[in-house]
Structures are given as C-alpha cells and as structure tokens.
Image (spheres, grey):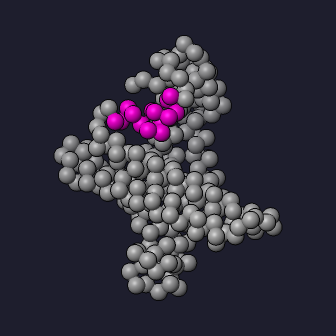
Amino acid sequence: MATLAFVIFIYGLIVAFQKWGTGVTGYALEPQEGKKGSAITFLKTWWKQVTEESHHHGTPILEILILDIVFQRRILKRSPFRWIMHLCIFGGWMTLFALSGLMFTVEITEKIGIELPFTPDVFREWLSIPNYVFGYILLIGVLIAIVRRLFVSEVREASIMYDWVLIGVIFIVTISGFLADGIRTGLIWSFGLDPAAAPPAALFHSIFSLLFCIAFIPYSKYIHVIAIPLALLANKGGE
C-alpha cells in the first residue's frame, strides 16, 4: 500500500509539473504553441529562476527556506490566528510523516536481515512521545481550522463542501492514529476497547493516511504544500 501510494503521488506530481511546464522556457513568456507540457521543461525553468541572482526579490534561499517556508512569516503578517493554524497543521503533518518514514525504514531494515542496535519495538517506543506531541499539534491545527470555518463569517461564506472534505480527511487521520495507539497501549484514547482491535485500527489508520496524506496530495488543493514553496524559491521570497 505504501508503494502504491507513492506511485500514485509521483504520477500526480509529474502530471502537475507537465501542466505547469507547458513549453515555457523563460520567465513571463507565453507557452509555445502546440507544444505539450513537459515536467522536465518546468523543472529546468524553475531551477533557472532559482539560480538567477537578479531574479525577482533576491532574498537569500536559506532565509526563504527557514522564514518563508518553515515558519511561514508571510501568513503571520496577514493573520496571527491563521498562522498558528497553518503552522500546527504543516508542522504536525510533516513531522509525523518524517517519524513514520523513520519507523518504516527501521522495520524494512530488520526484514531484509540487517542487524541494528535496537529492535523495531524499542524504536517505536522511542518515537512514542514525539508522535504524541506532534499528533496533538496537528489536532490543534485541525480544530482551529474547523472553528474558523464554523464561526468566522468570511471564512464560512467562502467555504464549499470540498473544503470540509479536506479538513475532515485530516481530522479522521489524526483521530484514527490516536485511537489505534490508545487501543494498543490502553491509555487515554482506548475508550475501554479490546486490545485485539489494535491491529485492525492501526491498519485502517495506515492505509487511510497513505491514501489521503500522500497519494491524494497532487490531485487536491493540498498540492499547495508543494507549489507554494516552489513559487517562493523561484520568486526569491517577497509577496
């Protein structure tokens, strides 16, 4: 399922690059008539803009990576409340993805016969606290997003069913993760359920997360987690 999710993700990303690279070989030029979009053309054009020192605002790339992409200062200037929401969702999502990747790597390493100084079970316990912390950070961000769409009039009026579906997907991913772990450990989120339900709950969480937090990204509005950093780097910062 992980392999399938990544294949679907990569395919969708290539299609997106093809749409963005419709034969344009320079900044502010019209697409070449009759030429099919090329992912390679897009990447070459993007890289050329990134490496041109005189292009656009000229903000150093390291500053863009840290302040604009990681800490999202452009959103902070517009709305501190919205900034907290975005930072919680982005930070929680990306960190949990990285932790899951580490866990996956350790499990695969053991299965192919490479000995490690620790077992996957021990490594899972090491990751338990970071998983909880960033899981709650993600949950806070999702709850803020729900509150904004329910009680902030301008956000509520601009929301369509598609927006609610996207928020609902992240909410289900977050809650199902807490439930799966709670059933396994018998802690806060167990709700007194039989520990035998832990493997099916974990399987549901894993497959749902793979499908909607990886495979679905290039086909949804969540493509902005890729498009916006690329645009910021190409524009060298700025608005």
228 vs 185: above or below = above
- In this rendering, would 129 be left or right of 136? right
Residue 177, image x and y in percent?
Answer: 47, 67
6 vs 196: above or below = above
Residue 81, image x and y in percent?
Answer: 28, 44
Q: Quadrant of the N terminus?
A: bottom right
88 vs 186: above or below = above
User: At 25% across and 50% down in the image, what residue appears?
Assistant: 148
> Given the current orientation, which residue lies at the most extreme right position?
113
In the image, which residues are magenta?
A: 63-76
In depth, the one of 202 and 121 nearer the eye is 121
In depth, the one of 41 and 61 nearer the eye is 61
Q: Is residue 34 visible?
A: no
Classified by dominant secondary structure, the portion drawn in magenta counts as: helix
Q: Is residue 65 magenta?
A: yes
User: At 44% across and 73% down in the image, what residue appears?
Assistant: 179
In depth, the one of 155 and 42 nearer the eye is 155
Q: Is residue 80 visible?
A: yes
In depth, the one of 40 and 47 nearer the eye is 47
Q: Is residue 94 magenta?
A: no
118 vs 230: above or below = below
User: At 45% across and 47% down in the image, what residue appears?
Assistant: 90
Residue 174, image x and y in percent?
Answer: 43, 63
User: At 63% across and 57% down in the image, what residue appears?
Assistant: 102
Residue 208, image x and y in percent?
Answer: 50, 64
Q: Quadrant of the C terminus?
A: top left
Q: Quadrant of residue 40?
A: top right
How many tags in the picture? 0
